[in-house]
Amino acid sequence: MLEHTESARGRLSRRDLIKMAGATGLGLALTQGAAVRGIAEAAMQSEDIETIINIAATAEALAVTLTGAVIRGAAVYTNADGSKGLPPIVVTVLKAYQASEQAHFAFLTKAGAKPLALTFSVPDPKIATDTDAMYRTLESLETAFIAAYMSAAREFAEMQKPDLVKVALQIGGVECEHRALARLFLRDPLPHNLAFEQKLFTQVGEAAAALQKLGFIGGAGTPVRYADFAGSVDTAGVTQLTPT
């Protein structure tokens, strides 16, 4: 999907993601600078369960934070038709989106995951004001998250951890729904346009390296903190908040 949609609208391409991906594992780091150092230092490490869930928790925290910032700033957005403010249906969808990402984060941290960073950067100021820029960002991030969970599922299978494979697929399936919604809001004629997901990463750490290269971890953009949004997550209408 990314190969042709990115070239048409300037989104992150599969080739860009792979080019950005370099690390194969990450150590625990709680600041942006430490997270960046952890990515670089872990380039030669193999991944274990702790590494995988730490990276996953970081991605989920990023998703909660970015969607929280979008929801909080909904009134300032400019829509494609020139109108101001995100439509109410979009805000409702984003709240459900955020709730599911927070549920993922809660499950992972309860299982022992320690996020590599809880403060992130917004690399492009348009993400906070322009609806299409925001939707494109969500689409690209979700594509990376989906690919990361695909890699996690494979790695868990190789470790003979079927319960973890199941959870990776449960989370990855929801991320696919999120991407489809972003494509729908972007007016794509085929929000679901793939028969099979593409393999973008060999290991989950490569997804974290991509987030770093994109400027969401340790970047120079506007800082946003998970703690500023985690307490206001609205789970209304969202069910299956834990895996079964």
Image (cartoon, helix red, strand yellow):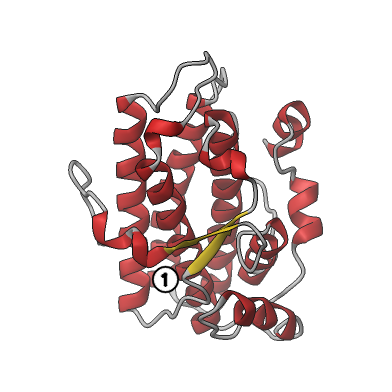
- Residue occupying the point 64% across, 69% down: 218
Residue 243 in view, yes or no: no
Q: Quadrant of the N terminus?
A: top right
Q: Is residue 205 above or below residue 44?
A: above
Say which of 202 and 86 sits in front.
86
From this viewpoint, is residue 207 visible? yes
Q: Describe residue 2's horizontal placement relative to residue 119 as left or right.
A: right
Q: In the image, what residue occupies the spot 77% across and 69% down?
A: 22
User: Is 196 or 110 nearer to us in this picture?
Assistant: 110
Residue 21 screen position, x and y as percent: 74, 63
- Amino acid at dot 1: Leu
In the depicted view, which residue is nearer to us: 125 or 112? 125
241 sits to left or right of 35: left
Quarter in which the C terminus is drawn? bottom left
Q: Which residue is mark 1?
A: 164
* Furthest residue toward top: 81
Question: Residue 205 location in percent, x, y?
Answer: 64, 71
User: On the image, which quarter does residue 206 sit in?
Assistant: bottom right
Classed neighbour count for the residue bearing mark 1: other residues with Cα under 10 Å, few (<14), some (14–19), many (≥20): some
Q: Residue at x 58, y 49 (%)?
A: 141
Q: Quick check: 205 left or right of 114?
A: right
- Is 241 placed above or below 165 here? above
- Asked whether, in this view, residue 32 is left or right of residue 225, the answer is right
Residue 238 location in percent, x, y? Answer: 22, 45
Q: Position of residue 194 (x, y in %)?
A: 60, 34
Q: Give the total number of marks visible in the rendering.
A: 1
Q: Is residue 183 above or below residue 110?
A: above
Residue drawn at the location 43% of the way across and 43% of the way down: 70
Query: In the figure, residue 227 lies in which quadrant?
Result: bottom left
